Amino acid sequence: MSIPVLTFFNNKGGVGKTSLVYHLSAMFANLGVRVLAVDLDPQANLTAAFLDEDRLADLWSEGAGVSTIYRSIKPLTDVGDFKPVAYQQMEERLALIPGDLGLSSFEDELSGTWTQALGDQNKARPFRILTAFWRTAQESAARFQADLIAFDVGPNLGAINRAALLASNHVIVPLGADLFSLQGLRNLGPTLRTWRAGWEKRRNDWAVPEFALPPGDMVPVGYVAMRHGVRLTRPVKAYTRWLDQIPGEFRHSVLGEAPGFMPVPPIQSDPYCLAMLKNYNSLMPLGQEARKPIFALRSADGAIGAHANAVTNAYADFKTLATDIAQRIGLQVPEKY
């Protein structure tokens, strides 16, 4: 039985996606869930959040072995298959498959095999390449005894992200309150449906697969409205103008509902709105310096006075969000947490 994959995806950058993956992975682990985080963004920002530069330099050195996601799947560019990756254990219940700037070179390989998987000859090789992320993540997750795999992906609609989404059971969309996030939804929803249908066709055309394939569910769980990018000088009216349009746009573009099909609730009561996260910009520099989630900061990290209260609020926010997500995707959180 495969381990569920939850992907955080928006083709618009700058919405706090990587920060969300980082903090939710840590919170799930804090709640007793064993999590394998996988950095599938060639910019490797999630990896940089977890690891300092010295550790990164070691992982990316020539003699480091199979130390990143790219080094795991690189043999597929020749005639081999993926190699098990040496994941990094960050905490007792949290591990990371590090990213790699070299991953971008795998894009062309994935683009070509998407078409080849429809051919009548030698289906095994294109399917091995298209499912490489899923298979290496599942292998590592089994070794780590993970309950959940969390994917962080780049802000685009390219072949790397398509392969990541094929591997995904659940999708959460981080959003900012701006025109660009709304436009991102308009692009993202139809693309997900196209990818899902394309993968279903390819799977059905391979009558007797030689190895397990991901179902490619890509089920939208909901969205998280992020406020990290809101400028202090920006009028509240301009902010709420875009925020108020998110529920309807999410239903139409991502869920495929016809406009006017059902009354659209305000974002505050929209069941697809998983959270409206506060702006914790004052804590972010402290978290980055301490290399900790903001809700784990202590007085020794500089979280005193008003910062200490913000840490308490951040813990409550992320715990509520993680618990809600777990319930929606059928992930069991140990009762003692």
Image (cartoon, rainbow, N blue to C red):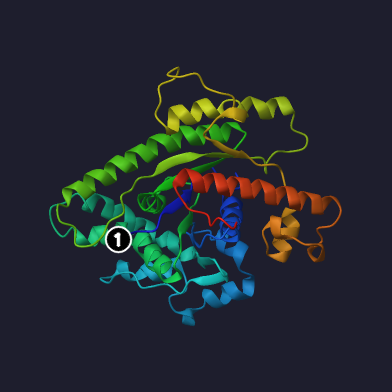
Q: In which quarter of the image is residue 231?
A: top right
* Image spot of residue 89 (x, y percent): 54, 71
Q: In this view, does 6 lie to the left or right of 45?
A: left
Secondary structure at badge 1 equals helix
Q: In this view, does 266 lie above or below 184?
A: above
* Image spot of residue 270 (x, y percent): 55, 29
Residue at (75% x, 51% y) in the render: 312
Name of the residue lying farthest toward the bottom? 63
Q: In this view, does 5 lie above or below 235?
A: below
Residue at (86% x, 53% y) in the render: 305
Q: Can residue 282 be seen in this view?
A: no
* Of residues 20 and 262, the one drawn nearer to the viewer in this rendering: 262
Q: In which quarter of the image is residue 295?
A: bottom right
Please state the total of marks drawn on the protein image.
1
Question: At label 1, which amino acid type do we have?
Answer: Ile
Residue at (45% x, 19% y) in the render: 262
Q: In which quarter of the image is the C terminus?
A: bottom right
Residue at (60% x, 25% y) in the render: 244
Q: Name the residue under label 1.
A: 129
Q: In this view, does 100 lie above or below 180?
A: below
